[in-house]
Image (tube, rainbow, N blue to C red):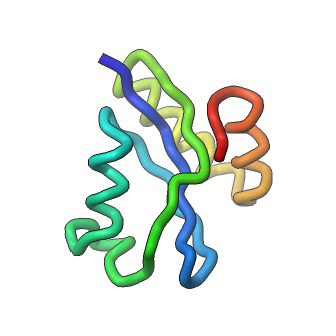
Amino acid sequence: MSFYAYMIKSESNGKHYYGHTSDINERLKSHNSTQNKYTRGKGPWVLIGYVQTESKASAMKLENKLKKMKSPKRALAWIERHGSAR
């Protein structure tokens, strides 16, 4: 099973959110519904990049690494080099 660390962006306010999941499409649906406390009412959210990993632990570590970069531009550049960006 694959896991992903991902980055999404709100089209309404330009904010970014980082997370990890085993199913990107379902997770994006939950961000755009009322299921997620942080992203609820702040969308629509669009996936702008992700990196595939082989374990949940490595996806969680990568999520934290992206968050610590403090700059969405820097995090997206890292994702572009190591994963897939849209």
Q: Quadrant of residue 59?
A: top left
Q: Relative to residue 71, is residue 53 drawn left or right?
A: left
Q: In this orientation, which residue lies closer to the viewer: 46 or 66? A: 46
Q: Is residue 54 left or right of residue 77?
A: left
Picture coordinates of residue 49, whole percent (x, y): 60, 45
The residue drawn where x is 61% and y is 40% is 65
Viewer-closest of 16 and 26: 26
Q: Residue at x 27, y 60 (%)?
A: 30
**Residue 86 in the image: x percent, y percent?**
65, 47
Is 59 above or below relative to 7? above
Up/down of 49 relative to 22, above or below: below
What residue occupies the far left of the structure in this picture?
Answer: 35
In the image, 18 versus 8, the foreground residue is: 8
Q: Position of residue 76 (x, y in %)?
A: 71, 48
- Total tally of numbered discs in the picture: 0
Q: Is residue 71 above or below residue 21?
A: below
Q: Residue at x 56, y 31 (%)?
A: 51
At a point 54% along the width and 83% down the height, the residue shown is 12
Residue 11 placement, left or right of 23: right
The quarter of the rendered structure image containing the N terminus is top left
Measuring from the top left, give residue 55's x and y in whole percent. Answer: 37, 19
